[in-house]
Image: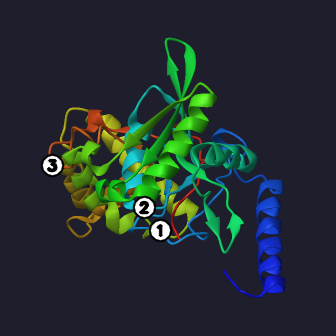
Amino acid sequence: MSKNPEKTKGIKAKAERQIASRLANGAGSGAGRSYKPYLTVRDVNSRGRYNRSPSVTVGRVHQLLSDLEYHVLLMLDWDSQVTDIREQFPVPLEESQAIAREMGIAHLSYQGTDEVLTTDFLVDLNIQDKTIRRAISAKYVEELDNPRVLEKMELERRYWSSKGIQFNLVTELEIPALLQKNVKWFHPYMNHFDLSTPEQQQEYFRVLLAAINQSPSQKVTAITTRLDDEYNIDPGTHLALLRQFLAQRAFYFDIEALTIVNLRARDLAPSHFWLEQDYEYAVGE
């Protein structure tokens, strides 16, 4: 912290204005397609490669601050019980400050100004026709050796417990091996699409969808090979296109149980957001 009182006061005032402005602009509010994360990838240094990703469940681009958060998003996105996924969800500052005082710990701060604490995911699930809410923290195992990280997690846990919401920890040890393998295959196209216009994207989406519906029991790799032959283009072209569509969540499948090698057409489902041409992209970041 600066030893100059006036400078310190100015830094604190600026930070408080930024927090107030962010909240006033709707950060951390809304639900479904209208939800706005409190933090975006532009606000922090993310850990890893995956920063933004569309979802099948919500149909908007999610702001993810680590590879692990991306893996968790995919797990949630596949779960049929999940109805909404809100990432980087803010804990009200006054409440987190009160809990920090109760715990006798320093609040999250930057240059002497208390900052808003965020929970990685706030998730709604439909269980027996009831909406159940869960808060999730995604942390690497090595982070759990840091006492400060544990303090912040306990603060989060106490806040959510006070709201009657269960708080869960997910580490990389809970991520299925096949999901990790699929993510590695998707990776080159997470923020890249060879099809530059919405018209091209929809055209090839419809081509792949028709071929998949036509041969539900056939292996997907055989279908894409047949399409290459029919269109008289380079081998592997349609498989590469499908790879891009899968990375962008235009089609989805059980990524915890299947890979492209054993994937059959009936295992693929089109995103209804793509069917209705009402989707957002992570491409371009």
* Number of other residues with Cα within 10 Å of mark 3, as a class: few under 14, some 14 to 19, many 20 or more: few
Picture quarter containing residue 280?
Answer: bottom right
Asked if residue 164 lies left or right of residue 173, the reply is right
* Nearer the camera: disc 2 or disc 3: 2
Looking at the image, which is closer to me, 13 or 209?
13
Q: Dot 3 corresponds to which residue?
A: 261
Spatial distance from mark 3 to mark 1, Cα to Cα? 32 Å
Residue for point 31% across, 36% down: 214
Q: Dot 1 corresponds to which residue?
A: 46
Q: Dot 2 corresponds to which residue?
A: 66
Picture quarter containing residue 262?
Answer: top left
Residue for point 35% across, 53% down: 144
Residue 122, given in percent of the width and then of the height, sits at: 56, 39
Residue 121, given in percent of the width and then of the height, sits at: 52, 44
For the question of whether residue 199 can be seen, the reply is yes
Closer to the N terminus: mark 2 or mark 3?
A: 2
* Number of other residues with Cα within 10 Å of mark 2, as a class: few under 14, some 14 to 19, many 20 or more: many
- State yes or no: discs 1 and 2 in contact (Cβ < 8 Å): yes
- State yes or no: discs 3 and 1 in contact (Cβ < 8 Å): no
